[in-house]
Amino acid sequence: MKTRPTKLLLPGLFEKSPSARHEVVGWAVCTETRMKKDHPPECRAGKVSGCKGTSFVHLHVHSHYSFMRGVSSPLAICEAARLRGFETLALTDTNGFHGLIRYLEAARRTGIRPIVGAHLKTRSEEAIALAKTEGGYAILSELISRIHLQEGFSLRSAFPHPTADVVILTSDPEIIKALGSKVECRVEVPPGPAGRKALEISRSLGVLPVATNAVTFAHPDDYPLHRLVRAIDCNRTLSTLPSHELAQPGQWLKPADAMERHFPHCPEAMANAVELAAACHTEWNFSRMVFPHYDDRNEDHFALLAQLCRKGIPWRYGNSCDVIEARLQEELALIREKGYVDYFLVVADIVGRRPIHCGRGSGAASLVSYLLGITHVDPIRHGLLFGRFLNPQRKDPPDIDVDFPWDERDALFDEIRKQYGDDRFASVANHTGFGARAAVREVAKVYGMPAGEIKEVTRRMSFWTDPAGIRERAKTHPKFEGFPIDPPWPEIMDWASRLQSLPRHLSVHCGGIILAPDAVSRYVPVERSRKGLRIIQWEKDQAESAGLVKIDLLGNRSLAVIRDTLDAVRRNTGRRIDYATFNPVDDPATVDLLRRGETMGVFYVESPAMRQLQQKTQRGDFEHLVIHSSIIRPAANRFINAYIERLHGAPCEPLHPSLKDLLRETYGILVYQEDVVQVSMALAGFDWGEADGLRKVISRKSPDQIGSYRNRFFAGCAARGVSEGVVRQVWEMILSFAGYSFCKPHSASYALVSFKSAYLKVHHPAEFMAAVLSNGGGYYSTLAYISEARRMGITVLGPHINESDWGYRGFDRTIRLGLQEIRSVTRETVEAVLDERHRNGPFRSIDDLLRRVRLNPADGAIL
């Protein structure tokens, strides 16, 4: 019986009618002809040598996001698949979607139709799960989360309710028997003896077999790297690594004809893989924004947002005016249009829990943020560009970063989790890889090198970050005299350089959290960090690409310094200073301190480079400090010198007439990220979206994308009559923003914290320096800060059993060292001493102390 294709469902894959279920067996993709009608059935079946066809689809594939087992990136896998004639591919990393967004991006780049799945594994069970529909993704995401979060979870209870959205591949007959009535099951058939046993299970249970190769690396020559990472993971040398910890050398992404040679006895298992691939969803789109929901049971909270902004006007400005009203209406309209209303309300609710915080980033350009108390810099007074934060063409989610005192953040997280619920809250992950020294150390251990020699080698390379360049560096650099470059060290260095591209495990992002409108696990799998925190499986870039709105809540020691100083001032003088409305930018003594660069301990302006810049410019006013906070970046050194010269009167001719007003306040130099945006719009005719895209590409240092934008920038400038010399100079300044740079709202927010710190140092020096020391200092050592306090005329007294607290205490012109500085004494002992002293008065003698407080022998230093 001849078969004929029915309606084309996806390029190369065919929709089958229910009555012709088995007619697709043996059909294949003809990528060269796209199944033209004049091609014979033999061609369609992949049996004509002249066609680049495949009679197989890989449905069990691991990338390097199967941590410390897979070794190929999603892009490498997709490129290998395309090279070998595949158009469809499933990525099934172990218990995770850690690299899912990277895989979908790679699939789009290479023309692969991606199938989403996972290798589900417990202590005694394993199976492959594929999403047949978009709804299947949410089911798998929650299932993976349960594997990580539920102790003793079993795959046999994975599906409490029947579903047609997922298909299970496994060679475990008990799983098939347990799940067969709830979900579609197939028998996974690998090559070799295990495959023959699986075929027996398929026949005995009457379940269709599906061929796979359990791919662990893209190319056969990646097998040694797989052995290496397994040895590292198992903490074994290569010679002692058990064979059961390894994949087989043949588990690479084999072409279809190579797979056919494994299954001459069961071609239907190959064909069933193609059939199953055709039934799985491949048009994945994760661009929909997932915003947190403000929890007061109302669907539309716009009226509440507008009301809160109205309440903020008299608090911030006293009275409204036309400028405030116009700006507020513009922002509210765009926030409503973009669907960001709940996001602002949630962030406002979070910051309202802590009086001392610093809203920063581009969100500080928003009047709405200022009126809600999220940020503290007046965006109207300081000319902050709202379009940098939000504009009609912006597609990625808004980004409001908020700093809190470093020792309050964990308690804040607990409050948020209790308020919104565990299911709706999770931290963002980091994908932690191998640093250069760690890579060399781990490879050397696997090679069985002596510990002393490993230590010596890594010590000598402590300043170097590229293992691959060590050998050449060793030949010429004096620090490498006697460096052991004899075998096997050259080989170790080469392997170490390959390790640096591999993710090793998850860690917790320094402050990013996700608050979902419902369970986070519906959007991305959730697991526990080593410290027990719930974290999503994506790092910040993948989370953003998938539409998850990240809220950054970060710890800042300088905010704790300000908090402790304000508390000390209140205790010592009775004066109460409100942090939110405390704005000393016009205080002459503070401006003069910043101008002189005497800023040790002052947030963000205490480094030698910043102090030198303040002294060279002799400017301590707020506007110039904002500029300095942004221009002080390594790539901008040559432009800093030009800035200083122009500041002191050197001629400042604009590179182009259209830039005269645009860069007037920065003396003709690009200083802020929004300068890149506005200059590219003015010179090259970019719109908001394209200009903001250039800014992002520059900051991420993507060579391919930078080259594309460069061509468009130069072409746009040429079309508008800008000379090539001017374009080259402007482009060179734009490139100085590569790596990291700040937008003006961010710099202004930090400059305001700098001003508050500087004000307290000027007017309450003892309290301020004591707070700096209590919170662990900043850029310098404890001794350096004590020396600075003495230079300021402050008397520094040693610790005293009856006078000292846990931290340093400042009063009048005196600082008393805290008991925290006494080594070998536990905090529990110090707290017991302080509690007893508070309840029953000072200690009269050592005997009195020993009678009233139980001390351990190790705590004798407190005496």
Image: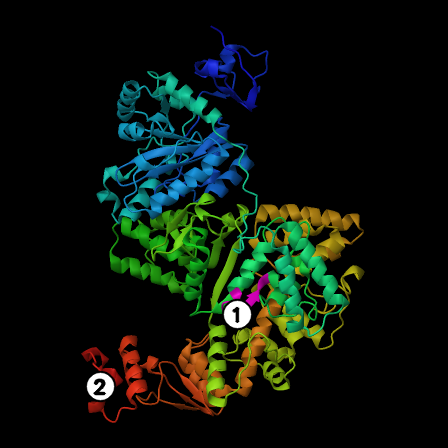
Q: Marks 2/1: CA distance?
A: 40 Å
- The colouring scheme, among rainbow, by chain, secondary structure or one colour, is rainbow
> On residue 357, which mark appears?
1
Q: Which label lies toward us, 2 or 1?
A: 2
Q: Establish if 275 lies above or below 471.
A: above
Is 461 included in the stretch rendered in magenta?
no
- Looking at this view, is 748 or 460 the one in front? 748
> On residue 852, which mark appears?
2
Mark 2 secondary-structure assignment: helix
Q: Establish if 459 lies above or below 335.
A: below
Task: Give the amino acid at mark 1.
Answer: His
Residue at left offset 23%, top offset 40%: 242
User: Farthest front residue?
Assistant: 297
Is 353 included in the stretch rendered in magenta?
yes
Instruction: Please say whether residue 663 is visible from this viewpoint.
Output: no
Task: Give the amino acid at mark 2.
Answer: Arg
User: Farthest bottom residue?
Assistant: 844
The quarter of the picture where residue 783 lies is bottom left
Task: Please provide percent x and percent y for residue 786.
Answer: 43, 85
Task: Please provide percent x and percent y for residue 188.
Answer: 34, 27
Where the C terminus falls, by quadrant?
bottom left
Task: Please provide percent x and percent y for residue 689.
Answer: 67, 49
Q: Which residues are magenta?
A: 351-361
Dot placed on the residue nearer the N-terminal end, 2 or 1: 1
Q: Is residue 70 left or right of residue 633?
A: left
Q: Is residue 501 left or right of residue 643?
A: left
Task: Please provide percent x and percent y for residue 624.
Answer: 66, 74
Residue at left offset 28%, top offset 36%: 125
Q: Establish if 43 lies above or below 396.
A: above
- Looking at this view, is 796 or 483 the one in front? 796
